[in-house]
């Protein structure tokens, strides 16, 4: 059995849940934390078996927003920052509970410049009906 | 699903049986809850990597503690960019080799007791004591505690974060209190355990009358405490919980309706729990250093040993309530004594006592005072009064089965 498989078993045993840590930063602070530091943080999380995925995002100026209404697609630029902080990146982690996830989130470097929202991942249920 | 793997089985078993002990010891060694939790996580991960290669160590718990400590200190060192292996580093290597230092069973058990006392430290808010105890000592997740207490998980998470910060900032010592303050500090621990039990046994709000998991956790905590610190009141509390628990199956009907003590089918009471509870009560009483939990348990034991409500030694129960009142002059105890008096001397005597309590303005918003008054009026055939009292109780209850019970009683007063 590989380490990876063993780790999966340990996580199942601990009933681990996934949490999405959303990193928010003001536009002029998007590069306030050196990329190297964020990469190191991701590497640390990966080595500790906490990390599922992590990415940094380009600024919202490069974004397009898609909507479908009555079968018709519309596209708008943005979102533009009415709110001061924008989504700058994310870390998808696995933790035993919300407090563990918060603890991990507090180690994400941009937490000291902006904020990190910790959201539990919801298990989709194929059997729910409207 | 891969076939059963002996290493994984071993890690799982150690996790199940020892992760709380490992955590307690790591908190002592590292002096920080969060660091210790992270270290424990790393230690189990290291076990998954190394045990398949090197075999399961002779003392897995000691191995995990020393691996966790190593990882934590190593991590701190890297974080602080220590550029040379200084003395701390050398000491570290020695510690990792010398696992015997953590193998001392007595020290490890003391660590669990230290953890209980730290989580229930009076500098922390009571809510925080409860949350911290359930999470750190019992190993419940924040989400599980939230569901059990019908509290949003982020609220609880904040409570736990703040409590840990308080422990850090106020430098709350991680130790079993000195004999001089032990009694008072133990009382705080017992109060937390009893609240957890009661939340499970008679949920104060919500749809389900009982939330079994919390009661089971409280009993587990009670056993742990008696094992680590066989104080008479710790024994008394455990006995009290076991005696309550013994009646669980009898106190609700299959459809979830409340069945009062007098009407319960005593043949379904759990005899094993009663025997254990009664044994503990006798042991606690024999010390002559017992307190209110032991006396309440003694009352429970008198009920448990009676064949029916009528065959109960009510005089003994009234006497025990008298002793209890001398220790704790509480109107709730007085109310319970009044109910026992009604059984011993007739409903009128009990009713006079309850009216006296209510007249003093105490318990006027306590639903059980009005419910007890209503029951006694009903037994006396004073249906109009009974109805009014049931209605007062109904207005005060937040519990679904209780509401249904009171509505049934109100309907009966019409006949």
Image (tube, grey):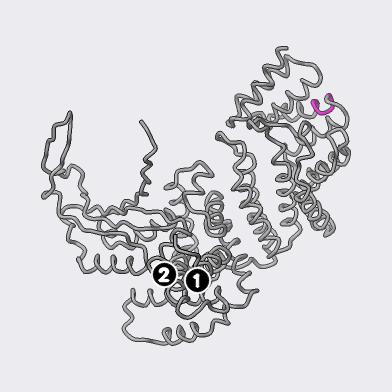
Q: Quadrant of the N terminus of chain B?
A: bottom left
Q: Is residue B79 left or right of residue B243?
A: left
Residue underneath mark 2: A1
Closer to us: B255 or B144: B255
Q: Is residue B173 among the parts visible in the rendering?
A: no
Q: Is residue B256 above or below residue A94?
A: above
Q: Position of residue A52 (x, y in %)?
A: 32, 59
Find residue A63 and name its label: none
Q: Is residue B349 above or below residue B240?
A: above
Q: Position of residue B49 (x, y in %)?
A: 42, 74
Going 17% across and 37% down the picture, which residue do you hit? A67
Q: Is residue B45 left or right of residue A31?
A: right
Mark 2 vs mark 1: give the one in front.
Answer: 2
Magenta-tinted stretch: B348-352
Contact (CB < 8 A) between labels 2 and 1?
yes
Residue underneath mark 1: B7
Q: CA distance from mark 2 to mark 1?
A: 10 Å
Going 77% across and 21% down the picture, which residue do you hit? B377
């Amino acid at each position: 059995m590989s380490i990876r498989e063993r780790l999966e078993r340990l996580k199942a045993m601990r009933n681990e849940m996934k949490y999405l840590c959303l990193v928010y930063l003001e536009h002029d602070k998007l590069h306030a934390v050196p990329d190297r530091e964020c990469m190191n943080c991701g590497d640390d999380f990966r080595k500790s078996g906490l990390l599922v995925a992590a990415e940094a995002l380009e600024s919202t100026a490069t974004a397009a927003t898609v909507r479908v209404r009555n079968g018709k697609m519309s596209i708008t630029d943005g979102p533009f920052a009415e709110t001061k902080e924008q989504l700058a990146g994310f870390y998808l982690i696995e933790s035993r509970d919300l407090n563990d996830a918060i603890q991990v989130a507090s180690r994400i470097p941009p937490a000291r410049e902006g904020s990190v929202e910790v959201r539990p991942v919801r298990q989709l249920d194929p059997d729910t009906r409207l | 699903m891969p076939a059963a793997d002996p290493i994984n089985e071993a890690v799982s078993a150690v996790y199940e049986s020892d992760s709380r002990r490992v955590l307690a010891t790591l908190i002592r060694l590292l002096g920080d809850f969060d660091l210790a939790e992270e270290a424990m996580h790393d230690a189990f991960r290291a076990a998954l990597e190394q045990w398949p290669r090197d075999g399961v160590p002779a003392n897995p718990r000691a191995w995990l503690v020393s691996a966790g400590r190593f990882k934590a200190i190593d991590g701190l060192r890297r974080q602080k960019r220590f550029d040379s292996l200084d003395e701390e580093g050398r000491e570290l290597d020695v510690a990792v080799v010398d696992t015997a230092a953590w193998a001392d069973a007595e020290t490890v058990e003391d660590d669990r007791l230290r953890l209980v006392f730290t989580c229930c430290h009076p500098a922390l808010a009571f809510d925080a004591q409860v949350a911290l105890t359930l999470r750190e000592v019992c190993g419940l997740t924040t989400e599980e505690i939230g569901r059990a207490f019908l509290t949003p998980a982020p609220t609880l998470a904040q409570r736990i974060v703040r409590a840990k910060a308080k422990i850090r900032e106020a430098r709350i010592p991680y130790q079993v209190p000195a004999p001089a303050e032990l009694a008072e500090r133990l009382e705080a621990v017992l109060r937390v355990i009893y609240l957890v039990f009661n939340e499970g046994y008679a949920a104060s709000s919500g749809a389900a009358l009982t939330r079994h998991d919390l009661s089971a956790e409280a009993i587990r905590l009670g056993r742990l405490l008696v094992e680590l610190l066989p104080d008479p009141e710790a024994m008394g509390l455990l006995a009290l919980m076991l005696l309550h628990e013994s009646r669980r199956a009898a106190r609700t009907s299959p459809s979830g309706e409340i069945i009062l003590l007098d009407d319960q089918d005593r043949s379904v009471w759990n005899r094993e729990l009663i025997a254990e509870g009664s044994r503990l009560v006798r042991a606690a009483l024999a010390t002559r250093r017992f307190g209110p939990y032991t006396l309440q348990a003694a009352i429970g034991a008198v009920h448990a040993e009676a064949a029916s409500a009528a065959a109960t030694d009510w005089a003994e129960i009234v006497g025990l309530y008298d002793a209890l009142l001398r220790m704790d002059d509480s109107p709730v105890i007085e109310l319970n004594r009044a109910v026992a008096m009604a059984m011993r001397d007739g409903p009128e005597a009990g009713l006079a006592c309850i009216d006296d309590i209510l007249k003093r303005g105490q318990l006027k918003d306590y639903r059980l005072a009005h419910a007890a008054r209503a029951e006694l009026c009903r037994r006396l055939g004073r249906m109009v009064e009974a109805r009014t009292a049931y209605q007062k109780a109904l207005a005060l209850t937040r519990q679904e089965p209780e509401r249904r019970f009171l509505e049934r009683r109100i309907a009966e007063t019409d006949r």
